[in-house]
Image (tube, rainbow, N blue to C red):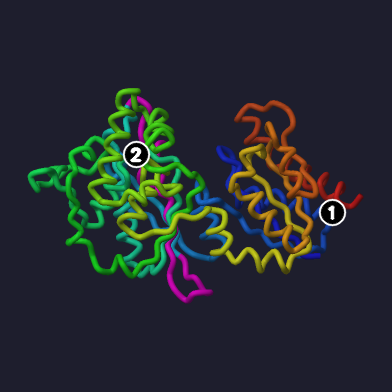
Amino acid sequence: MKILIAPDSFKGTFSARQVASFMAKGVKKIYPHATIKRMPMADGGEGTVEAVVFDLRGKIITKKVTGPLGYKVKAKYAFVYDKTHHQHLAFIEMAEAAGLTLVHESKRNPLYTTTYGVGELILDAIKRGAKEIVIGIGGSATNDAGCGMAQALGVEFLDKNGESVNNNAFMCGKLLSDVRAIDTSNVSPKLKKIKFLVACDVSNPLFGRHGAAHMYAYQKGASKSEVKFLDKALRNIANAHNKPKVASLPGSGSAGGLGFGLRAFCNAKLESGVEIISEILNLKDVIKKSDLIITGEGRLDRQSMHNKAPVGIAKIANKYKKKVIAVPGSVGHGYEKTYKYFDVIVPAATGKYTHKELIQYTPKLVEEAVVKALGKLKK
């Protein structure tokens, strides 16, 4: 029997790789002679770098780059060789260089944060020979429409007098309203030869009621008046770049408008994170060769229906009429709707646990939940 174990991470407690090992122990108790393939999964967010490196035998690159407040931070990204397309591929989590967790709560304000470090990671990946760059966007501290990133790539932003708006500072949300023209003459020609994919699972446009500022700037530290200012600034940068259609594309407002910036400056394609990762890992072929698939995530609920890894995996498995088990850390409101994708759902934790208790008990709870789920499947 061939069993594929492909969970996402249990956010805040265990990585996808760790969860897969807990699940494997449970499988061995019921099927000691089964052939088990562990494939840690991700949807483009937290844990994707680790999953890609593990599954494709790549390496993690660590580089000092400019953080969201202009201070240097250590950021990691995955660098792998894609055997299917015979080229090097880099996977960057933008939160490594411009994430909200890098900014102390007392200093959070998207008027002053930048994505410059994301651009530095892109340049480093290109320098190492990457021909395709996938960028996972989520958890950002920024609202600069990706202009900080573009600045690092050589783009210059000019005011009404034709002077640089940033005056040697990093581009940030506050400066977007001053931009009247954009100069890309100093951008390396190499950039046009790189294929960019954005792992994006939100559909917000750049500006407006459902745009980057109104939907996400509050949680990044902006006040009501600052949100209004930022929304106008985002509208202005779209006009300055003469990219109104790009601004209205679903996902342009993701990560404080980084989705827009990557599309406008790097000609990136915005796609579902699960679909991108599944294709990179050749998941379809692995599922075809498996008899049973076991997956999971930290919490299975109605949000899991929207491009989350477990449901994405199950959809592929369903096409090939494979049995699928879900072992999430816990279940929440609306999880019942996911039963149309899974044959069995058994949560690891059904009671209330402190964070410390979850760290202690989750390995055994996951193992036992897998045993229980396999028992249900046999009936």
Query: In the image, what residue occupies the spot 67% across and 66% down?
Result: 286
Q: For the residue carrying disc 2, how many other residues have a C-alpha within 10 Å: few (<14), some (14-19), or many (20+)?
A: many
Spot occupied by residue 91 in the image (x, y as percentages of width and height): 44, 58
Q: Is residue 348 magenta?
A: no
Residue furthest to the top = 224
Residue in the image at 36% along x and 67% along y: 194
Question: At which x and y percent is residue 112?
Answer: 26, 35
Looking at the rendered structure, the secondary structure element under dot 1 is helix
Kindly identify the amino acid type of the residue bearing the numbered disc 2.
Thr
Any mark on residue 142, and which? Answer: 2
Residue appearing at x 41%, y 33% in the figure:
209
Which sits earlier in the primary sequence, circle 1 or circle 2? Answer: 1
Residue assigned mark 1: 30
Camera-side residue of 173 and 133:
173
Q: Which residues are magenta?
A: 80-106
Q: Position of residue 308 (x, y in %)?
A: 60, 47
Q: What kind of element bears circle 2?
A: loop
Total number of numbered discs in the rendering: 2
Which of labels 1 and 2 is toward the front?
2
Q: Amino acid at mark 1?
A: Ile
User: Left or right: where does residue 19 sit relative to residue 114?
Assistant: right
Q: Is residue 81 magenta?
A: yes
